[in-house]
């Protein structure tokens, strides 16, 4: 079955919805279709706690300071022109989402916004809604989306693969110039039908990749589908070795997927990291102590845990004012209490967990990928903003700034393209219903073990080689299954996660230095030139 649309947006988090709303609003004659593999509100966006970093109080803060903090966190790999674009255009985008109905906390006088602080920032500049900023942004965006008559959101549609000349029988290589994207195949999860969605322009806004690790703050939807689809379509992917581990996920011996996050804003509010003996340790690693950038804090915690042999450390909030803490962090407070931890009396046990993918689909300053008619936006991209390590609360900002730029570029380009009617429908000949789900669930467990054991915060040549050898076996077995079994979301996600595991591990092997989030015991120093890892 075929369906046609002018603009196909895959993903309904902050990146996808912002871009779709803007495009639909600017051109009521265009049809904009948004796909999401679960319900519209489930996304990484929904779980964002800390907030949105933006230069807001111009009496105290400046663009130059936010730019300098971003460059410093990025450890020499940020693209400075992109950093400037995001920092300077960011405040206007924040004002727009406020106009669309998003709320941020204000000071007690009800006037100025209450600006939070997080690691690596030299000023208070984090706009937030309690510790539920992402939930609030997602709510505002969904309400705005409902007003758009020329925009439809198809829930429970799983995008399987991008459509290119390959589907017209052409042989496409990674070096082939002028690959075009004509839309995507998508599985309707409710009835199992696979539809061919043809579009003039396709935008990937599929979010993060955290589910390649055993411990992650990312929800189960974060399986790197857009990055894997682009790689299969022979698009360029950059900087996948830079996986950000958040220093303070809540340690829960019962195990949870995802891990619950204890926001960095809690440290910005005055909480202190302590070892198992209750002693401070961060001063030995960085003069900014508990508020150093994330790569430094996560590595310090990893090191302290290895020294003590313990499986967590502590975050101390006991000296903080209870009313202020509860007003700012009600979700964190309630979650701790539900586990018998009173943050005002007990130290909170914390561990690092995979949190953010700094690499992704290589795009230019208008979000254009290396494939024609294909844009990408949000966490699935590599724009050059984050370099080797993302500064806290810069990603929601990046998504909003790029959504705006992409919508402007789409408005210029969309009328140049036609719908490619010749693309054939999905061919399921020769496939059977899966008999053994255990093959999928067990391979997923194996993947998470491989990535957590060998491609975590600290890496080495021998660990990376071991990971690649094992990933190759998983890849071969899963491709066999994919060729012979009818399509299921679980199988597609496994296939995508294995591809992401490969991209992370291979990029880590290619980077023969330690920089930002990539630390290897074989090359502990930084190279004195800039090396890019593009696959
Ligand atoms: P997402 O919000 O993840 O949306 C992805 C969308 O793609 C979803 O709708 C999903 O269903 C859809 N999708 C994926 N694959 C498919 C497919 N195959 N077919 C169809 N649909 C698909 N950043 C900050 O700046 N500040 C913060 O305070 C902050 N806190 C965070 C706290 C947590 C716990 C987490 C996990 C992240 C946090 N981040 C924060 C990071 C930030 O939330 C994300 O980077 C950002 O929300 C990503 O937005 P996105 O629109 O790119 O992707
Ligand atoms: C947090 O609240 O600690 C997360 C902020 C971020 O990931 O940007």
Image (cartoon, helix red, strand yellow):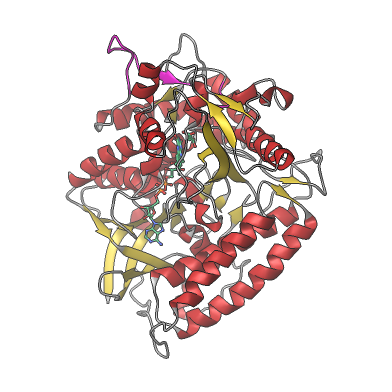
Asked if 446 appears above or below 513 in the picture, the reply is below
Residue drawn at the location 58% of the way across and 79% of the way down: 477
x 42%, y 15%: residue: 321
Residue positioned most to the bottom: 430
**Position in image of residue 31 (x %, y %):** 24, 56
Viewer-side residue, 144 vs 180:
144
Q: x, y (%) of residue 176?
A: 60, 68
In this rendering, does residue 177 appear at all? no
- Left or right for 450, reference 363: right
Residue 397 vs 124, above or below: the answer is below
Q: Residue at x 25, y 44 (%)?
A: 142
Count of picture labels: 0
Q: x, y percentage for residue 408? A: 38, 42
**In which quadrant will I find the N terminus?**
bottom left
- The picture places residue 47, in percent across and down from the top left corner, at 39, 42
Residue extent of the magenta highlight: 105-121
* Residue visible at 52% across and 78% down in the picture: 170
Q: Nearer the viewer, residue 224 or 67?
A: 224
Above or below 334: residue 517: below
Q: Which quadrant of the rendered structure holds the C terminus?
A: bottom right
Out of 321 and 328, give the one closest to the viewer. 321
Q: Is any atom of residue 127 visible in this view?
A: yes
Main secondary structure along the magenta-highlighted residues: loop
Q: Is residue 288 magenta?
A: no
């Amino acid at each position: 079955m075929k369906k046609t649309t002018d603009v196909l947006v895959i993903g309904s988090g902050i990146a996808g919805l912002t871009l779709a709303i803007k495009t639909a609003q600017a051109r009521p004659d265009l049809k904009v279709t948004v796909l999401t593999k679960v319900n519209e509100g489930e996304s990484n966006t929904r779980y964002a706690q800390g907030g949105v970093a933006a230069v807001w109080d111009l009496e105290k803060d400046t663009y130059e300071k936010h730019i300098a903090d971003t460059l410093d966190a990025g450890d020499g790999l940020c693209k400075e022109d992109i950093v400037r674009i995001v920092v300077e255009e960011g405040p206007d985008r924040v004002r727009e989402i406020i106009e669309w109905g998003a709320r941020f906390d204000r000071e007690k006088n009800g006037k100025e916004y209450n600006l939070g602080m997080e690691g690596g920032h030299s000023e208070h500049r984090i706009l937030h809604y309690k510790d539920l900023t992402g939930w609030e942004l997602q709510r505002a965006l969904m309400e705005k989306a409902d007003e758009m008559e020329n925009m439809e959101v198809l829930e429970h549609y799983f995008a399987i693969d991008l459509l290119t000349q390959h589907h017209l029988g052409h042989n496409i290589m990674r070096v082939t110039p002028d690959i075009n994207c004509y839309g995507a195949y998508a599985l309707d999860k409710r009835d199992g039908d696979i539809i061919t969605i043809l579009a003039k322009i396709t935008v990937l806004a599929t979010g993060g990749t955290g589910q390649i690790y055993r411990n992650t703050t990312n929800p189960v939807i974060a399986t790197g589908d857009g990055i894997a689809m682009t790689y299969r379509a022979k698009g360029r992917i950059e900087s996948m070795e830079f996986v950000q581990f958040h220093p303070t996920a809540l340690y829960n011996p019962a195990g949870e997927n995802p891990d619950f996050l204890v926001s960095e804003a809690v440290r910005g509010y005055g909480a202190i990291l302590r070892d198992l003996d209750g002693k401070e340790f961060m001063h030995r690693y960085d003069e900014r102590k508990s508020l150093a950038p994330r790569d430094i804090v996560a590595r310090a915690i990893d090191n302290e845990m290895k020294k003590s042999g313990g499986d967590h450390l502590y975050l101390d909030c006991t000296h903080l004012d209870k009313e202020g803490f509860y007003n700012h962090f009600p979700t964190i407070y309630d979650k701790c209490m539900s586990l018998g931890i009173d943050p005002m009396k007990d130290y909170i046990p914390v561990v690092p967990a995979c949190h953010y993918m700094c690499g992704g689909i290589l795009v230019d300053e208008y979000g254009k990928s290396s494939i024609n008619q294909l844009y990408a936006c949000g966490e699935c991209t590599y724009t050059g903003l984050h370099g080797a390590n993302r500064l806290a609360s810069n990603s929601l900002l990046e998504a909003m700034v790029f959504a705006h730029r992409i919508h402007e570029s789409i408005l210029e380009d969309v009328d140049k393209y036609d719908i490619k009617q010749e693309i054939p429908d999905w061919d399921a000949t020769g496939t059977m219903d899966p008999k053994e789900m255990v093959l999928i669930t067990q391979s997923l467990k194996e993947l998470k073990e491989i990535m957590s054991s060998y491609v975590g915060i600290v890496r080495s040549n021998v660990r990376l080689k071991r990971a690649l050898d094992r990933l190759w076996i998983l890849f071969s077995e899963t491709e066999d299954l994919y060729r012979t079994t009818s399509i299921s979301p679980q199988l597609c996600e496994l296939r995508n996660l294995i591809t992401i595991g490969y991209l992370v591990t291979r990029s880590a092997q290619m980077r023969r230095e330690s920089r930002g989030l990539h630390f290897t015991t074989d090359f502990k120093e930084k190279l004195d030139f800039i090396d890019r890892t593009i696959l």
